[in-house]
């Protein structure tokens, strides 16, 4: 018998799971998502979240509370009489009263191999730390931050030049299929949960702007991991003189390379850059106000020569 589901999510990452749940025949009683945010050049236009747009396309009631701590919001949540709440990158804390409201509790789709990378930015942190593997997990939610027992796991290799954007797209597809299978098992009463390991806990704190400026004194592998872990957003950046003026350049893709020299120094005419140890080749960059471009395309419009230096 199909389940009555409350779906809670906000970014593009959550959309495939919402769509898959609806296509699997479950009754989505309501969708909870973050309120519309100011966007546009002047920041005056309120833009609904990707999940809200998908919910409206599917004809599902959408709710956008700024908090779930109030008694009125909690009563409205309980009144939906859901079998289960599915949470994927919602972005709001769920109080105990909300966690306990659905008959079968709340389950979460989380993009890491828990207990590694609990928290807000598991995809970026896994790549920035040089992990070779991550995955999607379905877990039961508790009051702690991503501490609940795990029901299902789907592992995913992190390839050497994979960016956070690449991994995001792969995991959101994996996560949708995994959640549909979890709900099918929940229907059959065969979904079982196992407590997370006590050892190996790490926290994926939110990316801070101070981390986005590249430190070329770090090793080539660390610089490479930072570039791909922050791509495409918010993007790692560095400054270099173009046409005699310092210009901020966003660095979107790179590859480990051969060479040595002063940290941040350009080693050839193909954007090979020296790091504290080793070197990287820039593969894709973006000038301020411009679009992402292959290094070869960028070099046709910007005079960057051997001996110049990123700072």
Image (spheres, grey):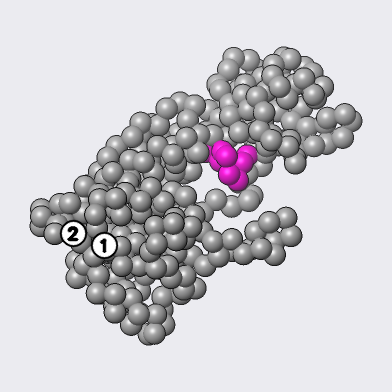
Vertical order, 280 against 142 (above or below)? above
Q: Is residue 303 magenta?
A: no
User: Residue 101: where, in percent of width, then height?
Assistant: 26, 74
At 39% from the left and 62% from the top, the residue drawn is 59
At 72% from the left and 55% from the top, the residue drawn is 41
Q: Residue furthest right?
A: 244
The N terminus lies in which quarter of the figure? bottom left
Secondary structure of residue under mark 1: strand
Left of 16 or right of it: where is 265?
right
Please tell me which residue lies in front, 259 or 160.
160
User: Magenta part of the protein: which range?
Assistant: 229-236
Q: Which residue is mark 1?
A: 27
Which is nearer the N-term, disc 1 or disc 2?
Answer: 2
Total labels: the figure holds 2
- Whether residue 139 is visible, yes or no, is yes
Please tell me which residue lies in front, 20 or 186.
20
Residue 299 sits in quarter: top right
User: Residue 82: where, in percent of width, then height?
Assistant: 25, 70
Q: Say whether marks 1 and 2 touch (CB < 8 Å).
A: yes
Vertical order, 174 against 274 (above or below)? below
Q: Which residue is mark 2?
A: 2
Q: Residues within 10 Å of mark 2 (few under 14, many from 20)?
A: some
User: Residue 220: where, in percent of width, then height?
Assistant: 57, 26
The C terminus lies in which quarter of the figure? top right
Vertical order, 275 against 259 (above or below)? below
User: Residue 242: where, in percent of width, then height?
Assistant: 83, 30
Secondary structure of residue under mark 2: loop
* Measured Cα–Cα span from mark 1 to mark 2: 7 Å
Left of 72 or right of it: where is 225?
right
At 53% from the left and 28% from the top, the residue drawn is 221
Q: Residue furthest bottom?
A: 71
């Amino acid at each position: 018998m199909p389940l009555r589901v409350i779906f809670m999510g906000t970014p593009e990452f959550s959309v495939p799971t919402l769509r898959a749940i609806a296509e699997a025949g479950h009754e989505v009683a309501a969708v909870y998502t973050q309120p519309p945010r100011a966007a546009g050049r002047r920041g005056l236009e309120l833009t609904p979240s990707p999940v809200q747009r998908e919910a409206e396309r599917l004809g599902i009631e959408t709710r956008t509370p700024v908090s779930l701590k109030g008694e009125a919001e909690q009563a409205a949540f309980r009144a939906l009489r859901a079998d289960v709440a599915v949470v994927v990158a919602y972005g709001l804390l769920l109080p105990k009263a909300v966690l306990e409201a659905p008959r079968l509790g709340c389950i979460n789709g989380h993009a890491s191999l828990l207990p590694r990378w609990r928290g807000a930015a598991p995809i970026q942190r896994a790549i920035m730390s040089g992990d070779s593997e991550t995955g999607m997990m379905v877990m039961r939610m508790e009051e702690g931050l991503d501490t609940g027992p795990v029901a299902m796991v789907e592992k995913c290799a992190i390839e050497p030049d994979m960016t956070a954007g690449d991994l995001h797209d792969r995991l959101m597809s994996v996560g949708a299929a995994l959640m549909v299978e979890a709900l099918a098992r929940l229907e059959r009463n065969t979904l079982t949960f196992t407590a997370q390991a006590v050892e190996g806990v790490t926290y994926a704190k939110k990316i801070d702007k101070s981390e986005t400026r590249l430190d070329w004194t770090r090793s080539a592998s660390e610089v490479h991991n930072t570039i791909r872990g922050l791509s495409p957003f918010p993007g790692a950046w560095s400054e270099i003189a173009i046409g005699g003026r310092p210009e901020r350049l966003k660095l979107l893709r790179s590859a480990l390379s051969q060479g040595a020299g002063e940290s941040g120094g350009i080693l050839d005419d193909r954007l090979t850059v020296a790091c504290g140890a080793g070197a990287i080749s820039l593969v894709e960059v973006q000038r301020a106000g411009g679009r992402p471009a292959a290094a070869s395309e960028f070099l046709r419009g910007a005079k960057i020569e051997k001996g110049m230096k990123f700072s």
